[in-house]
Amino acid sequence: MKCVCQRPGLHAPALVADYIEAGLNAARYYEKQQCLLLQELYLRRTFHEILNKMCDSLIHCAIRKQCLEQLYKPLMALKRFYKTHNSTRKYLILEREARILSHEFNPF
């Protein structure tokens, strides 16, 4: 998501959605390969990247808003992953972090 957008208000939804989809596709690939560590890595990396962009005040406001609105996608994928592998505690920690940061750095 480090590209320079001429019209971020117009391209923000597609930009964020494409980034999330790429991360989830990588996680699906490693799920098929039965490599749980890499699957978790890509899910967590996508989640944290979206969360960090949402909290970064140097990022355009439209992109930050889209990160906030689409944060549920990687979070739900992580919930599914952790529920499948009996690690509900890890998911609850991530959910709490997202809740706190979304209230603290809400761009609107």
Image: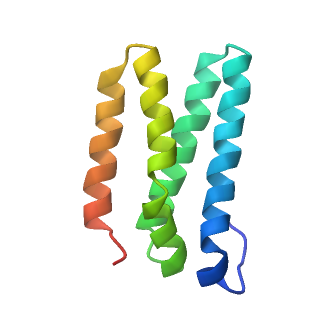
- Classify 8 as above or below 69: below
- Report the residue at 33% width, 70% height from top: 106
- Classify 23 as above or below 50: above
- Classify 22 as above or below 89: below
What's the colour scheme?
A: rainbow
- Report the residue at 33% width, 22% height from top: 88
Q: Quadrant of residue 15?
A: bottom right
Q: In which quarter of the image is the N terminus?
A: bottom right
Q: Position of residue 20 (x, y in %)?
A: 62, 50
Q: In which quarter of the image is residue 23?
A: top right
Q: Position of residue 67 (x, y in %)?
A: 49, 62
**58, 65: nearer the viewer:** 65
Asked whether the viewer can see residue 7, the reply is: yes
Asked whether the viewer can see residue 1, the reply is: no
- Classify 59 as above or below 25: below
**40, 10: nearer the viewer:** 10
The total of numbered circles placed on residues is 0
- Report the residue at 47% width, 33% height from top: 78
- Report the residue at 46% width, 16% height from top: 84
Q: Where is residue 82 in the image (x, y as percent from the top left)?
A: 43, 23
Q: Position of residue 38 (x, y in %)?
A: 64, 25
Q: In which quarter of the image is the C terminus?
A: bottom left
Q: Quadrant of residue 29?
A: top right
